[in-house]
Amino acid sequence: MDLKKLFGYEGKTVVITGSASGMSKSATELLLELGAKVYAIDINKIDLPVTKAFQADMSKKEEIDKVIEELPEKIDALFLCHGIAAFPGKELLVQKVNFYSQKYMTEKLLDRISEHGSVTYISSVGGFGWQQVYNKAVELINLPTWEDAMEWYDKHPDLIKSAYVFAKQCLESYVTYKCMSPEFINKKIRINAINPGDTTTGLTEDFNKSTSPNGDVKEGEEMISNIFLKSWNGYPAEPKDMGYPMVVIGSDICSYMSGQLIYIDYGLTSSWTSLALLQANNKSIEELSAEANNK
């Protein structure tokens, strides 16, 4: 079996953001290995042998537009992977980078994406519970322009207070809301997102600082460990643990997969869901275990 043919990237045109580091860099390396022609974008310098690299600030519409002008007229797969941690006073910046720029790029490039192409995002376990803000997210999604969205954000300071969480919840809402929309489904363009759990990347220190109320790296690291790792005596993922599956999802291997939010977190969010269902039924794990043992 020819693995390159199985993936279907050989000779295909791929656009990916965030390639300078982390999960996206791992994905970009694999795309190159599989024979793709890669156009990569990051605010930082990209040191990979891609077809063309761009440096751009993804919070700025004019810089995004400039890059879009230089991208190929036909794109087979689009990966939107850029993101930042949240800090007080940076709420709007986080919305622009972690969600709105991704929606904007998708829709600006949609006419160029080939039939049976794919769009794949990096979201986050931090977007868990996206259903709770779905109506508001759809309201934002349906605004026609970047400027309308910025005005909407100004009018909803309480929603964007949980900056990182809300941005990722909007991204996950976008995938579910748009997967059967005519502009995607008429060309059979697949749209999916991965939701990584705790992963060690170049942003780890920023996430540790932003998690701690005092901006303390060690305190934030402990808090993240307590949330994501302590319950299963686990370990953080490496960038390739996220980047490689993302490449698979955007490939011909997953040619019938669309509208999916894939949690890559060693089962953590499934356990959260399980606990919530048990609590809703007023039975704890201990009670259920006792019942099973008495049978």
Image: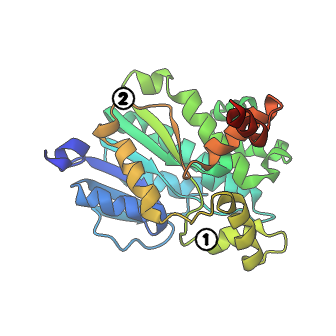
Q: On screen, 29 above or below 96?
A: below
Judging depth in this view, the residue of 158 and 58 nearest the camera is: 158
Q: Residue 7 appears at what percent x and percent y?
A: 25, 45
Q: In the rendered view, does 7 fall on the left or right side of 98?
A: left
Secondary structure state at the residue bearing disc 1? helix
Instruction: Tell me what residue is drawn at x 50 percent, y 37 percent.
Output: 107
Q: Is residue 133 visible?
A: no
Crowdedness near tag 2: few (<14), some (14–19) or many (≥20) residues, C-alpha within 10 Å = few
At numbered mark 2, what does the secondary structure look like: helix, strand or loop? loop
* Rendered location of residue 202, percent (x, y): 54, 72
Q: Quadrant of residue 269?
A: top right
Q: Which residue is identified by label 1?
A: 204
Q: Is residue 63 left or right of residue 205?
A: left
Q: Earlier in the sequence, mark 2 or mark 1?
A: 1
Residue type at mark 1 is Thr
Q: Which residue is pictured at 13% across the width and 44% down the height?
A: 1
Q: Looking at the picture, tell me which residue is in the foreground, 45 or 3.
A: 3
Q: Quadrant of the C terminus?
A: top right
At x 14% / y 47%, what residue is drawn? 2
Q: Residues within 10 Å of mark 1 (few under 14, many from 20)?
A: some
**Quadrant in the rendering for residue 277:** top right
Q: Which mark is residue 256?
A: 2
